[in-house]
Image (cartoon, coloured by chain):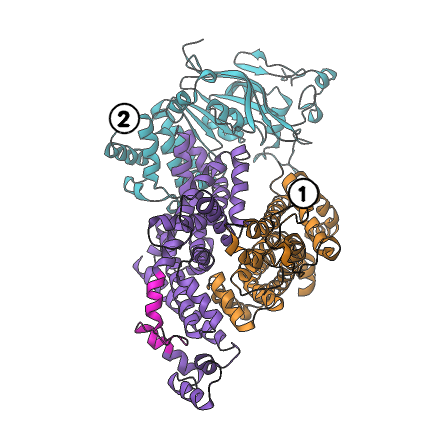
Amino acid sequence: MDENTLLKIDNLVVKYFLRKSTVEAVNGVSFEIKKGERVGLVGETGAGKTTTALSILDLVSNPPGRIVSGDIYLNGENLRQKSEKEMRKIRGNDIAMIFQDPMTSLNPVLTVGDQIMEVVRLHNDMTKFEAMDKAKEMLELVGIPGERYLEYPHQFSGGMKQRVVIAIALACNPKLLIADEPTSALDVTIQAQVLDLINELRNRLGMSLLLITHDLGVVAETCDKVMIMYAGHIVESGTVDKVYRNIMHPYTSGLFNAIPKLDEDTDRLQPIKGMMPDPSNLPEGCAFCDRCPNAVEACKTRKPELVQVEEDHMVACFNPIKKEA
Amino acid sequence: MAKNDAYKKKEGGNSQFKMVWIKLRENKFAMASLFILIAVCLVALFAPLIAPYDYTKQNYEEILMFPCLKHPFGTDQFGRDIMSRIIWGSRYTIVIGVLTMVVSGVIGTVLGILAAYYPKLDNPIMRFLDIFSSIPDMALLMCLVIILGTSMRNMIIALGLYYIPGYARLARSKVLTLRNEEYVEASIALGASDGRILMSHILPNSLAPIIVRFTMSTGGCILEAASLSYIGLGIQPPEPEWGLMISQGKGFLSTNWYYSIIPGLCIVLVSYCLNYLGDGLRDALDPRLNY
Amino acid sequence: MLKYSVKRLLFMILTLFLTTLFVFALLEFVPGDPARIIAGEGATEASLAAIRDEFQLNDPFFVRFFRYIGNLLQGNLGVSYKTRQPIAGAIGSRLPLTMIIAFWGVIVGTLLGLLAGTVSAVKQYSLFDRVLTFISLFGKSAPSFWIAMLFVLIFSLKLGWLPASGSYSFKYWILPVATIGLQASSGITRMTRSSVLEVIRQDYIRTARAKGQVEWVVVIRHGLRNAFIPILTQISSSLCEYLGGTVLVESVFAIPGLGNYVLEAVQRQDLPVVLSGIFIICAMCSVVILVTDLAYAFIDPRIKSTYGFGVKKKKTAQKEGGNK
C-alpha cells in the first residue's frame, strides 16, 4: 500500500438487520484518503454516508447493524481485525469523529472542561492538572475563552457547542477527523464560522479530513477530493476540480442542477424526479435507474462499477454524461 | 391539510385499532395475560355454577384439611371449601377493580379536562388534588374508611377518591399539550365548538395513556382493596374476599400454609396479568416502536 | 441557591399546613359523637357534657384547628381519646421502628433496582432482561403483607433461619426490610430500565464512545448520571409510599410501629391519634420531597444554574426535572 495513504476502505458492506427487513445501507464502498488530504463525501439523507463513517470507528449500532464484509486499513493495519480494546485506543486518538447536532452531542451534566479532559486522559498519561491545562488550551484553540472550561453545555450557544465538540475531537491530535454534517444543524452565519475553524485547524495541525455533507458548495471550498454517494454506492469520485468541471454521473448532474443559481433567471427549481429507493428493497441493477434521464437497458439489470474516465476521476455509470467538446 | 389530518384520525380510527390489535397480538405475554383475565372474569360471572360448594357452608368435620381431591385448595377453620371461596371471591376482585377505575377514571378525566379548559378553575382544582395526593396511600385510605365505614360500596368510593388525582393530572396534561397541536387550531379556525374539538380530536388522542393507566391502576387498586381487607378495614367476614382470606389464614401459617398463600397467588396472578397487559398495550399504542 | 432552598422550605410548610387542615376537616365527618367514644358505652349525659368541656369539643372548627396547630408548634400532638395519654410520647417510641423499616427497605430496593435496571437496559431483550422484568413485576403485583408471609413461611417456619416477629435485634429486621426492599426494587428497576434505555440512545453517549471510552464507564458516568433524575423521583415517591404504608408489614411481623398505631386508632375511632399520626407521616413525606427537590439541583446543573441566576421555576423543576 502506498506510504502516503492514511485510510483505505475496501469493498465495505454494512447492513442493518431489522425484525421484518434488512436495510442495505452500504453496498461495496471503496476509497482512499491520503495523509493530509481533505475528502468530501456528498449525498442525500439515507445514502449511507454516516454509516460508512461509523464503520471506520466500528461504532455502528450492533444490533441491529453489522459490518458484513470489507476491510478498513489505517496506515496499513486492518481495523476489522482489531479487538475492541485496540479500537478504543484508536477512537478519539488516531481517528476522531464529530457529529451533526451539537445540541445533543455533549453530556449535559458534565462541564465542558471535564469532557475535554476525559478524552485527553484516556489516551495520554497526564495528571488531572495537566489535562485541565490541555482542556483550556483546546478551548482557546477553537476560539472560546479558556476560563469557561468550568461551564456546562447548556450555557453555550449552538455554534459554541460545536466548537467544544471540535475541541474534544482534536484534543489528542488525531490523524483523521471525520466530520459528519458538522454544520447542518447550525444557522448559516455560524456555519461559515465553524467551517472556517475546521479549515484553519486542519491547516495548522495537518490532519486528514473526511467531511460528510449534502452541501456541494461547502465541499468546493473545503475539500481536495469529492465522492458522491447514492443508495450505498459511490457513483462518482475524483478531485473537486475534475469532478466539478466535468460532471459525468447523471445523479451528480441532478444535484448540481437542483442548486438555485443567483446568476440565472429561472421560474422553478429543478429537483431530481422521484425518490431514493427504499434501502431495504433495493432494485436489481443501478439504484438510480428509475430516476435517471440517461438510463439504458443495461442499467436495469446490472450494477455499474467505478471505472476511471480520466486522471483523478472515476464514475460508476453505463451511460455517463459526455462533455461537449 | 390539517382538516384532512383530522379526517384521517377519525376515519382511520378503525384501522388504528386493528394496527394496535395486531401489534398486541405479537406480544405473547400480553395475549396470555388477556386470556387469563378473561377467564377470571368468566369465573366471577359464573361463580354460582362453577363453585363446587356453597362458600358459606361450614362443615366442622372437615376443618383445616390440606388440599386433596375433594377440596383442591383445602378447607379453612370452619370447614368451608377454600376453592369455592376463591371462586366467589373473584367477584369482589373484579367488581371492585373495574368499578373503582371507571368511577375514578370518569370523574378524574372530567376534572382534568375542566381544569385544562377553564384556567380559572385550574389552580384550585389542581392544588386541591395536590394536597389530596400528598397524603400517602394507606394513610389516606384509612382516613376515608374511618369516615365512610366498611362496606364494599364505601371501599369503592374511598379507592375511587384515591385514584382521581392521577387521572385528572393525566387528562389535564394531555388536553394542554394537544390543544396546541395544529390540527386543533385548524378546527377552531373552522369554527368547531369546544365540545366537538374535545370529542373528535383530544379524546381519541389521549385515549392511549388513559387506557394504559386504566389497566395498570386496576392492578394497584386490587392490591389496595386486598390490603384494606387484610387490616380489617375493607370487606368484612364472612365474605370471601381474597385479602381477607389471607388475613384469616395468618394464624395457621405454620400448619396450613395454603390457607393464606393460595388467595395471595390468585391476587398475584390477576395483578401480574394486568401489568403485563398494560405493558403490552403501552408498547402497542406507542407509534415509535415500529421496529 | 440558598434563596431557592428557603423558598422550597416555606412552600413545604404551607403545603403541610393545608394538608393538616384538610385532614382535620375530613375527620369532622366521622360519624358518631367524639364524647361518646371517649366516655365509652353507657355514659350519662352529664359525663358526656363534662367530657365535651374537658376536651373543648364544643368550640368552633377553626378555633379547634388553630389550637391544634398551636399545640403542634410546641411539640404537643394531642391526647388520645382512649388512653388519655399524650400522643407525642407514643409516637416518639414507635416512629423509629417505622422509619427503620421504610428507609432501609428503600435503600435495599434502590441498590437492587439500580443494578438490575441498568443491566436490564444495557442488555435489552436478552434472557436476563426478560427474567428480571418478570421478577420485578412480582414485587409490584404481590401484596406486601403476602410477600411478608411468604418470607416468614420460607425463612422462618420452614428453614428456621430468621425470626418471624418482634424487633429486638438486627436479625429481626431482615425479613421486614427484605419485604419492602423487594417491593421497592420493582418500581425502581422499571424506572431505571426505561430511563437508562432512553438515555443510552442519546447522541452524547455516542460521542463518549467515539472518544474511545470504556463501555461501562460510558453507561455509568454518561448514562446513569443523566438517567438519574426520574429514578430519584421514583425513589422519593417509593419512600413516601412506604413511610405511610408500613402498617401492612408491621402487622405481619408484629412490630409496634407508627402504622400499627394509626390502624388501632382507626379501629377504635381515636381521632386525635389518627390526626396526629397522619400529620407525622405527611411531615416526613414533605421532608423527603423537599430533600429530593434540593437534590435535583445538585444532580442536574441546568436546574442549579437556573436558580443560581434567580429565575423562579418551582413546579417546572419538580415535574420536568427529567427532560433535557
Disc 1 crowd rating (10 Å Cα; few below 14, some 14-19, many 20+) is some
Residue A201 place in picture, x, y as percent: 36, 28
Q: Residue A197 carries which label?
A: none
**Callouts 2 and 1 on one subunit:** no
Q: The cyan chain is which one?
A: A
| Mark 2, residue position | A125
The colour assigned to chain B within the rendered structure: orange
Looking at the rendered image, the quarter that the C terminus of chain B falls into is top right
Mark 1 falls on what kind of element? helix
How far across and down, in percent of the image, does residue C199 sit?
A: 47, 41
Q: What segment is highlighted magenta in the picture?
A: C68-95
Q: Which residue was labeled with disc 1?
A: B31
Chain coloured purple in the rendered structure: C
**Residue A128 versus residue A150 in the image, above or below:** above
* Marks 2, 1: nearer the viewer: 1
Nearer to the camera, B132 or C68: C68
In the image, what residue type sits under mark 1? Met
**Element on which disc 2 rests:** loop
Left or right: C1, with A194 as reference point: left
